[in-house]
């Protein structure tokens, strides 16, 4: 990924595919990785579209680091799996949008 181009390259697609293969035995780690991948994809879409509103929502840099906390007993593993599934769906939609935008980069 060069600074001059906002098109997806092979390493971006590999990162996306790796995010989809995250081990389901660790939903907290999966959630963290999926959120990071979603943030990266949103930044690429924002750069491609040049939307300042999206940049304002994302902030100027990486989100602040929050200390890890163990899940509360009331948080069911199924809730985390559902959240991961929703994030994967969002990543898939953003990947599709980026692929469509990439057609204009050639």
Image: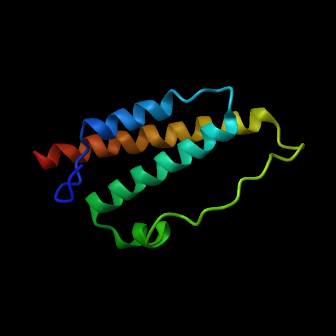
Which picture quadrant has residue 23?
top right
Which picture quadrant has residue 17?
top left
Residue 4 percent coordinates (x, y): 16, 59
Q: Is residue 68 left or right of residue 87?
A: right
Residue drawn at the location 23% of the way across and 54% of the way down: 6
Q: How is the image coloured?
A: rainbow
Which picture quadrant has residue 53?
bottom left
Q: Is residue 93 left or right of residue 86?
A: left
Q: Is residue 83 visible?
A: no
Residue 73 percent coordinates (x, y): 89, 43
Residue 56 percent coordinates (x, y): 45, 73
Q: Total number of numbered labels?
A: 0
The furthest residue to the right: 73
Q: Is residue 90 left or right of residue 86?
A: left
The furthest residue to the front: 67
Between 15 and 53, the residue placed more toward the observer is 15
Residue 29 percent coordinates (x, y): 63, 39
Q: Is residue 47 left or right of residue 36?
A: left
Residue drawn at the location 51% of the way across and 26% of the way down: 21
Q: Is residue 24 visible?
A: yes
Quadrant for the C terminus in the image: top left
Residue drawn at the location 62% of the way across and 42% of the way down: 31
């Amino acid at each position: 990924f060069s600074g001059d181009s906002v098109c997806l390259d092979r390493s971006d697609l590999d990162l996306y595919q790796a995010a989809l293969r995250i081990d389901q035995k660790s939903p907290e780690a999966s959630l963290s990785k999926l959120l990071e991948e979603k943030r990266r994809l949103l930044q690429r879409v924002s750069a491609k579209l040049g939307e300042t509103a999206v940049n304002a929502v994302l902030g100027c840099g990486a989100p602040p680091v929050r200390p890890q906390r163990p899940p509360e007993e009331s948080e069911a593993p199924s809730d985390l799996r559902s959240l991961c599934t929703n994030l994967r769906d969002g990543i898939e939609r953003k990947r599709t949008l980026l692929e469509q935008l990439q057609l204009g980069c050639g």
